[in-house]
Structure formats: C-alpha cells, structure tokens
Image: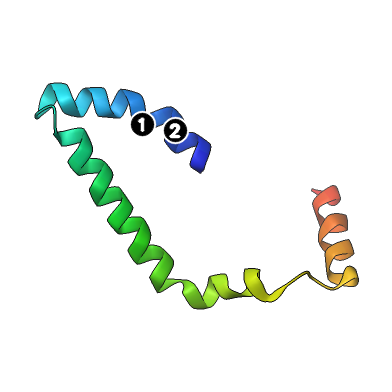
C-alpha cells in the first residue's frame, strides 16, 4: 500500500491543486493522515499480535509452506 500511495500521490495532488486550490493537496494529505490514525487506533487490538514477538518455528514453517502452494 505504501508504494501505491507514493505512486498515486503526485498526480492526485496536481489534479487537486488545479481543480480546487493550490492548498487543497495539503488539506487532502492532512485528512489522509487523520484517517490513517483513526484506522490504526481502531485496529490496535488486531495489530497488537505483530508486537508479540517472533512466531513459533512451526507456525512460520506452515505459513511458508502455504505460500509456496499458491
């Protein structure tokens, strides 16, 4: 997602600046950051498992094996 946003941001910022006002791109960026903050805060419980440490070796091996099957 991060790289897609980086690729889309320049043309969208240009379109916003041309269509609305030169400062519209900054307002849009600020709103995007606020939305991202709300999403992170709302999903903290789900994201918490990322901070729990490394997965057990068996779980990691199963995930790798499942990925190779796809």
Q: Where is residue 65 in the image (x, y as percent from the top left)?
A: 88, 56
For disc 2, the neighbor class at 10 Å (few under 14, some 14 to 19, many from 20) is few
Write the residue at 57% across / 74% down: 48
- Image position of 70 with respect to 42: above or below: above
Q: Where is residue 12 in the image (x, y as percent from the top left)?
A: 29, 28
Question: What is the number of callouts on the image?
Answer: 2
Judge from the rendering whether residue 36 lies leftward or rightward of residue 59; answer left or right. Answer: left
Q: Position of residue 52 (x, y in %)?
A: 68, 76
Q: Is mark 2 on a helix, strand or loop?
A: helix
Image coloring type:
rainbow
In the picture, the disc for residue 50 is: none
Write the residue at 9% across / 28% down: 21
Write the residue at 85% across / 73% down: 56
For the view shown, which residue lies furthest in the left direction?
21
Q: Is mark 1 on a helix, strand or loop?
A: helix
Alpha carbon separation for disc pair 1 and 2: 5 Å
Residue where numbered disc 1 is placed: 9
Contact? badges 1 and 2 (CB < 8 Å): yes
Residue where numbered disc 2 is placed: 6
């Amino acid at each position: 997602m991060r790289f897609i946003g980086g690729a889309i941001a320049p043309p969208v910022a240009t379109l916003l600046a041309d269509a609305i006002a030169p400062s519209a791109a900054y307002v849009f960026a600020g709103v995007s950051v606020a939305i991202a903050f709300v999403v992170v805060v709302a999903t903290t419980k789900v994201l918490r498992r990322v901070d729990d440490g490394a997965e057990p070796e068996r779980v990691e091996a199963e995930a790798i094996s499942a990925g190779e099957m796809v």
